[in-house]
């Protein structure tokens, strides 16, 4: 389960409320994920990231079905999606496809939206994705 | 940037390699000292002549295994000390593309005069127990962004861009299997290989269960114990040594790519930054893809073969799977591109770039025995992903 730190705490607090917030550089106003000591976009050394509401829709760029897990607390198989969030210049999130047991997408480019799930092994809610109805 | 001053100024003059096995019955460090002594003797030198040591000591695992110098890893410092050498230059490469990185350090040391003869080694260890397994329950730091979702380890990492390639370009498991079958065919012919005498056919490949779609265990090189060592010196000194020199024409390393989640390698990042890695190699060498007889592409995961073939320009982006399935890299077909003739990692074992470098050296030095490919002049030894690793070009002639 995630261990929030002083930078990431707002992300996990919002996740517990079912809200997606992402780090935004206060200097160049670019969303970056994950946040780093230096803004990867404008390279400011004091980016003062603020977690702000982020788009909760996106498109599938790839996926893989995990059939053998190398971590405890995960039931296999499950599908992981590589998602580009809408309007954020190819910013990607990786998350599970919900609900558990759902067949993987058929094509790259399928629309998805963010939901929050508590993992089978317990712990705070994490962002996952469901395939949007056409 | 000024021109690349090291072109053809440094040569590989000798080598040695241990058998590549699942587990050696001796400590890795003891094996490394024996292999180093053998490589130095092969070059016609003594330990007293060798004053430079470079390596990358990285233990290639994401699991929970401890790192112990001389046991699970062998640093340049440990090797120099335990050989009883009196070196003037000892260092390790930090990063990926470990063997090209260590060779580049050796070239720079020889060009600067920091050392006269450099031993480059790579020692790989296969820890007991599950290689990548982790009992970790808590995800701190960078891991908190991916581990809670179950995104963990190199097999999931390679699953995403491989499926992206499948979906975008219509590649299939049969196409990926063609890579593995070619690597295992060549590896089966190598007496030192873990897979000696053990080729794989496409039916066996297709019957393997998937780990992370579309990756099965045969797409992953097998963890092994093994050590290889190469001796490098200046081209001038190489003239007086017994083996035919193989010149380092140029080296290249990947530049930083776009900020992403840990272990997230979108296909476009691989292609764009990989093409820049190749451009650096062509610019520094003054040569192009058509001048290369033996591009030994990296294959720690089978799809890397496609990614390198495309980065180096042997196929348009999105075409490498058809190229390989059509026999384009068949080492037994005259006129094909023998890109895995040295067995690669899939056909030898997880030796992290050693099979590629060894094949370049043996072929270009005329020391490949009954596998000798007549007329081979230029080779490239690649390692890791083209956007994350590196490559070294070698030549049998001063270019």
Image (tube, coloured by chain):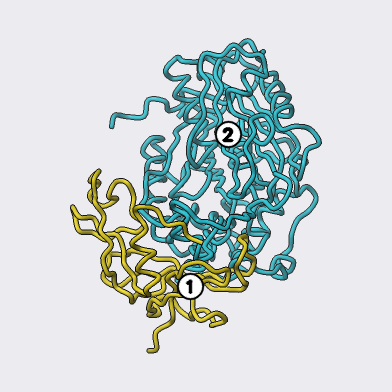
Q: Name the residue at 45% across, 54% down.
A: B262
Which of the 4 image quadrants contains residue A28? bottom left
Rendering colour (chain B)? cyan
**Could you say where residue B195 lies in the image, as x and y percent from the top left?**
75, 49
Q: Can residue A76 be seen in this view?
A: yes
Residue A18 versus residue A40 in the image, above or below: below
Residue at the spot 43% in from the left edge and 20% down from the top edge: B111
B267 left or right of B57 in image: left
Q: Nearer the viewer, residue B237 or B125?
A: B125
Task: Give me the residue at 38% from left, 36% from top.
Answer: B286
Point out the image quarter for the C terminus of chain B.
top left
CA–CA distance in space, label 2 to label 1: 37 Å
Same chain for the residues under marks 2 and 1 in the image: yes
- Residue matched to label 2: B57
Characterize the local packing of mark 1: few (<14), some (14-19) or many (20 or more) Cα atoms within 10 angstroms: some
Give the colour chain A carries in the figure.
Answer: yellow
Asked which secondary structure carries label 2, the reply is: loop
Residue B10 % position (x, y): 49, 23
- Where is B155 relative to B111, above or below? below
Q: Which mark is residue B159?
A: none
Chain of the residue on which disc 1 is drawn: B
Badge 2 or badge 1: first in the primary sequence: 2
Instruction: In this rendered view, identify the residue nearer to me: B6 or B70.
Output: B70
Q: Position of residue B80 (x, y in %)?
A: 61, 19
Q: In this view, does A75 lie above or below B266?
A: below
Residue assigned mark 1: B167
Residue B330 visible in rendering: no
């Amino acid at each position: 389960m995630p261990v929030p730190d002083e930078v990431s705490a707002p992300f996990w607090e919002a996740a517990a409320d079912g809200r997606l917030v992402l780090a935004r550089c206060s200097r160049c106003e670019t969303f970056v994920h994950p946040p780093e000591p230096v803004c990867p976009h404008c390279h400011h050394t004091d980016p003062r990231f603020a977690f702000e509401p982020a788009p909760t829709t996106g498109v599938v760029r790839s996926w893989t079905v995990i059939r053998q897990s190398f971590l405890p607390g995960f039931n296999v198989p499950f599908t992981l999606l590589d998602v580009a969030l809408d309007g954020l210049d190819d910013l990607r999130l990786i998350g599970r496809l919900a609900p558990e047991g759902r067949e993987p997408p058929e094509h790259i480019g399928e629309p998805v939206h963010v939901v929050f799930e508590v993992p089978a092994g317990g712990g705070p809610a994490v962002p996952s994705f469901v395939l949007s109805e056409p | 940037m000024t021109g690349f001053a090291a072109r053809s100024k440094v040569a590989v003059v000798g080598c040695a390699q241990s058998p590549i096995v699942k587990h050696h019955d001796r400590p890795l460090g003891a094996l490394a000292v024996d292999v180093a002594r053998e490589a130095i003797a092969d070059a016609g030198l003594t330990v007293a002549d060798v004053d430079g040591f470079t390596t990358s000591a990285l233990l290639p695992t994401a699991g929970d295994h401890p790192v112990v110098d001389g046991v699970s890893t062998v640093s340049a410092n440990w090797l120099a000390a335990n050989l009883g050498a009196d070196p003037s230059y000892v260092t390790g490469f930090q990063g990926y593309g470990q063997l090209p990185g260590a060779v580049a350090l050796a070239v720079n040391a020889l060009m600067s005069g920091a050392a006269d003869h450099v031993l480059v080694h790579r020692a790989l260890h296969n820890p007991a127990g599950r290689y990548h397994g982790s009992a970790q329950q808590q995800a701190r730091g960078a891991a908190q962004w991916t581990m809670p979702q179950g995104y963990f380890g190199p097999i999931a990492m390679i699953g995403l861009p491989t499926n992206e390639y499948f979906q975008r370009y219509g590649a299939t498991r049969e196409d990926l299997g063609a890579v593995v079958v070619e690597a295992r065919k060549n590896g089966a012919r190598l007496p030192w290989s873990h897979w000696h005498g053990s080729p794989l056919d496409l039916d066996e490949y297709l019957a393997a269960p998937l780990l992370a779609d579309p990756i099965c265990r045969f797409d992953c090189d097998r963890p092994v114990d093994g050590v290889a060592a190469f001796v490098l010196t200046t081209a001038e000194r190489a003239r007086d040594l017994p083996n035919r020199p193989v010149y380092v024409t140029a080296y290249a390393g990947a530049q930083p790519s776009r900020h992403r989640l840990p272990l997230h390698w979108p296909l476009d990042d691989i292609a764009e930054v990989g093409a820049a890695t190749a451009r650096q190699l062509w610019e520094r060498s003054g040569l192009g893809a058509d001048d290369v007889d033996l591009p030994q592409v990296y294959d720690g995961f089978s799809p890397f073969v496609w990614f390198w073939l495309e980065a180096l320009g042997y196929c348009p982006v999105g075409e490498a799977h058809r190229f390989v399935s059509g026999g384009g890299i068949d080492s037994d077909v005259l006129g094909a591109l023998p890109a895995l003739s040295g067995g690669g990692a899939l056909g030898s074992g997880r030796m992290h770039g050693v099979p590629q470098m060894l094949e370049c050296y043996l072929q270009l030095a005329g020391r490949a025995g009954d596998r000798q490919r007549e007329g081979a002049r230029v080779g490239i030894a690649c390692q890791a992903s083209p956007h994350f690793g590196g490559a070294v070009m070698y030549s049998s002639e001063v270019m």
